[in-house]
Amino acid sequence: METLGVVAGIVALVAVAVIFFRGGLMAGCLTVLVAGTCFSVPFYKTEGALPLTADRLLLALLVAQCIIWRRWGLAERQPLGKPEILLAAFLAFLTASTFTHDWQLNGCQPVAWLIVNYMMPAAMYWVARQIRYSERTALLLFGGLALFVVYLAVTSLAEYFKAWWLVYPTYIATTAAEKAEFVGRGRGPLLNPIANGVLLAACFAAALMWWPRLKARTQRSPHPSPLLKGEGTTGFETIANALLRSPHLNPLPKGEGTTGFLPSPARGRGAGGEGSETDANALLRSPHPSPLPEGEGTECRRAIPEGEGTECRRALSIGQLALAAVTLLFLAAFFCTFTRSVWMGGVLVLALTVGLALPWNWRLPLLGGGLAAAVLLTATHWDELLAFKRDEALTADKTAESVELRPILATIAWNMFLDRPLFGCGYYQYKTEHLAYLSDRCSGLPLERGREFIQHNVALSLLTETGLVGLGLFTAMLGFWARNAWRLWRDVALPLWARQTGLLLLCALAAYLLNGMFHDVSVVPMANMTLFFLAGATAALRPLTRAPLGVTP
């Protein structure tokens, strides 16, 4: 067995070296993400306060590769912006909060958690924002995460149905046999349904980014228009596309069936601009049609003159039908976590990706109808949602008690905040400091029930341990990340892959914050790592939103 282990280790090192060298920094980031999910502490670790695991070793190699890539000119040297300044200030404050309190608690656990939960994700952010992004790099990101969500979904379903031959790594089945925590739910390789749900949501969003690329090609006429030169987009089509990218109104020749002026897509509502659909229909009826740029609410089509042997097909392609079918698999995996916040996160990701891609006149009825259906379902099944059996070792009453626990933990957090509002009790000091507040009887709640639990809200957790200063820095950083992602998505002059990178971060951030309302996701394995990685990818594309139209930095 030792010989096999050595051989497997050598093969793994060779494979990692090939991936890092051939795939670049993006492939390295995805490798670290997979290793941190599947081959971290439960798989193998060394002894010590901060055990050495495969993902931590790979992250160190990735940082070294990034430094070398920078010296060789293969990485992008991005200027510092407000998000990076806030991140540096937040990390500095967390470090000061850790070492000005009992940092040697439980064998230096505060230092270990600081490194694992924030320093390592910050290193991933630093690497990701220096990748040279192109459409190929973005497709590697979307494709890698899409394949990963298939693995996570299959593993979650296999674990729930006890099809252990489909489950890997094997420690998932081993811990289930030992009746560990959360057994009976889709824990995934992280052995935690909340962590599994956060990863499922982010990777699910990446899979949905493939939808517009899988659409069927429009059948072209055997008698091409004389205005379209050959197979490319030259001639009149090139001129029309150039005019459509102008920041001003673009004059088009008036004639039968044409419109006089077409607003720039950057000026109007939605990705297609105010009235873009109407103008598009008018242009397609013109004897000299020109294509519209691809964007939200519009579809980039090559205009085809109508005639014998010509057919304009809008049916779904085989690839889109396959993605729709696999989406059902992903939704089943969300359900198998038996975690209410994970369910809401999955639905929110689907609503964001579909809703932001719809034309404005479709959004209100579809999203409003979906929201009404969700409210109706919740109202009619409220008791079932509060109390249902999910863990093998727990009854349905225990599920209901988890809901009752939230106001108790919130009361403890509020009392702790009132005593230390600015700087908190110190990072990773909640487990010992909150014990002094359990005997308070003024609230009328049985605060003693919160003795064995950490905070179940990411904001309250930061508020009690780092005060208003720490929570404010973290919130401001997330706000800038969200703003940059939104700007990328809304800038229809950018290529689709760049805009979708911003949309991917918006979905991941939405799932992170929604789950963070009910759990402290900052200490959930790989949650911060995934979020910081996607934030770094979006930060690398931030200069695109400041560049003049038609110019790529």
Image (cartoon, grey):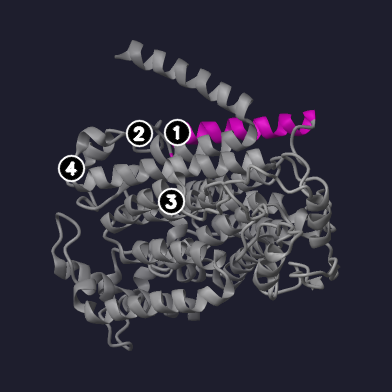
Q: Is residue 63 magenta?
A: yes
Task: Find the residue positioned furthest to the front.
Answer: 308
Q: Secondary structure at mark 1?
A: loop
Q: Residue at x 54, y 45 (%)?
A: 142
Disc 4 designates what residue? 162
Numbered label attached to residue 53 = 1
Q: Secondary structure at mark 3?
A: helix
Nearest the viewer among 331 and 19 is 331
Disc 2 designates what residue? 43
Numbered label attached to residue 199 = 3
Between tags 2 and 3, which lies in front?
Answer: 3
Residue 127 visible in the shown view: no
Residue 80, how many percent across, how many down?
77, 53
Three-letter amino acid code of the residue under disc 3:
Leu
Nearest the viewer among 207 and 128 is 207
Local packing at callout 4 (Cα closer than 10 Å; few below 14, some 14-19, many 20+) is some
Residue 379, how many percent across, how many down?
27, 82
Pointer 2 or 3: first along the chain: 2
Residue 67, how many percent across, how many down?
71, 33
Q: CA distance from mark 4 to mark 2?
A: 20 Å
Numbered label attached to residue 201 = none
Pointer 4 or 3: first along the chain: 4
Instruction: Report the side of 420 relative to 545 (left or right).
Output: left
Pointer 4 or 2: first along the chain: 2
Q: CA distance from mark 1 to mark 4?
A: 28 Å
Pointer 2 or 1: first along the chain: 2
Three-letter amino acid code of the residue under disc 1:
Thr
